[in-house]
Amino acid sequence: MDEDEQLVARARAGEAWALEELLAAIRPRVVRRCARLLPHTLDAEEAAQDALLSVATHLRDYSGQGSFEGWVTVIASNSARQTYRTLKRRFAERAVEELPVSPDPRTTSVIAGSRLDLLDAIEALEQVHPAATEAFVLRDIAALPYEEIAQLTQTPLGTVKARIHTARGFVRERLGVDVDNF
């Protein structure tokens, strides 16, 4: 049993200090996971805080299916996606006169733009192929192995691979990426 699993067991047993240590231990991983999806540090930090709160409040729900790391990855990825949706909604509600006429190239990141495009594509994927979205995020964003995704989603391995294949095709088309270069 590794250190995280020991802390999980103790925190689930009601030892408050173990929960605090567990959250401190996983925080850097959660922030990194959120930062892979959200282009701005403060947004990633906000998503990470929400994810850590979710881990703390739902730790008793962790069933042991798949690794604890994988379970946390699912929570962090979902938190980042939810934060993005919230930010997108807030942006849409702003008055047009508050927005700059053109983006400042010194403060606009190509990487950030491509991540936002990817988040938009994932959001569209969720509308068309909801079952494929989680598998895609866990494999291509979180870099979890196929077998662990199958465990976490309680889905046969072949189905997981088929969903990821479907999702990749959808995302490629949505992003306008040449199939040979994706």
Image (cartoon, helix red, strand yellow):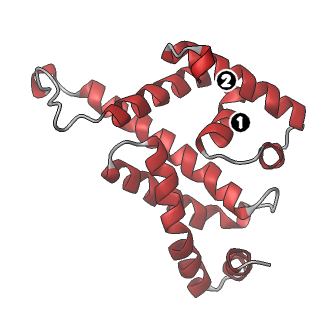
- 101 sits left or right of 69 in the view: left
From this viewpoint, is residue 50 visible?
no
C-beta proximity under 8 Å, tags 2 and 1: yes
From this viewpoint, is residue 180 visible?
yes
Q: Which mark is residue 33?
A: none
Percent x, y for residue 154? 84, 43
Residue at 32%, 32% (x, y): give it.
Answer: 110
Which residue position holds label 1? 135
Q: Secondary structure at mark 2?
A: helix
Looking at the image, tell me whether mark 2 or mark 1 is earlier in sequence order. 1
Q: Secondary structure at mark 1?
A: helix
Q: Is residue 135 above or below residue 96?
A: below
Percent x, y for residue 9? 74, 78
Q: Which mark is residue 167?
A: 2
Dot 1: few (<14), some (14–19), or many (≥20) neighbours within 10 Å? many
Separation (CA) of disc 2 from disc 1? 8 Å
Task: For the N terminus, give its image quadrant.
Answer: bottom right
Q: Is residue 14 above or below residue 157?
A: below
Asked where in the image residue 114 lies, by quadrant, the reply is: top left
Percent x, y for residue 21? 55, 81
- Work out whether residue 3 or residue 85 is closer to the camera in this orientation and state it: 3
Residue at 66%, 33% (x, y): give it.
Answer: 136
Asked where in the image residue 72 lies, by quadrant, the reply is: bottom right
Query: Which amino acid type corresponds to the residue marked 1 in the rendered image?
Result: Ala
- Work out whether residue 89 or residue 173 is closer to the camera in this orientation and state it: 173
Percent x, y for residue 48? 46, 57
- 150 sits left or right of 182 in the view: right
Residue at 58%, 84% (x, y): give it.
Answer: 16
Query: Which amino acid type corresponds to the residue marked 2 in the rendered image?
Result: Ala
Residue at 71%, 36% (x, y): give it.
Answer: 135
Task: For the C terminus, give its image quadrant.
Answer: top right
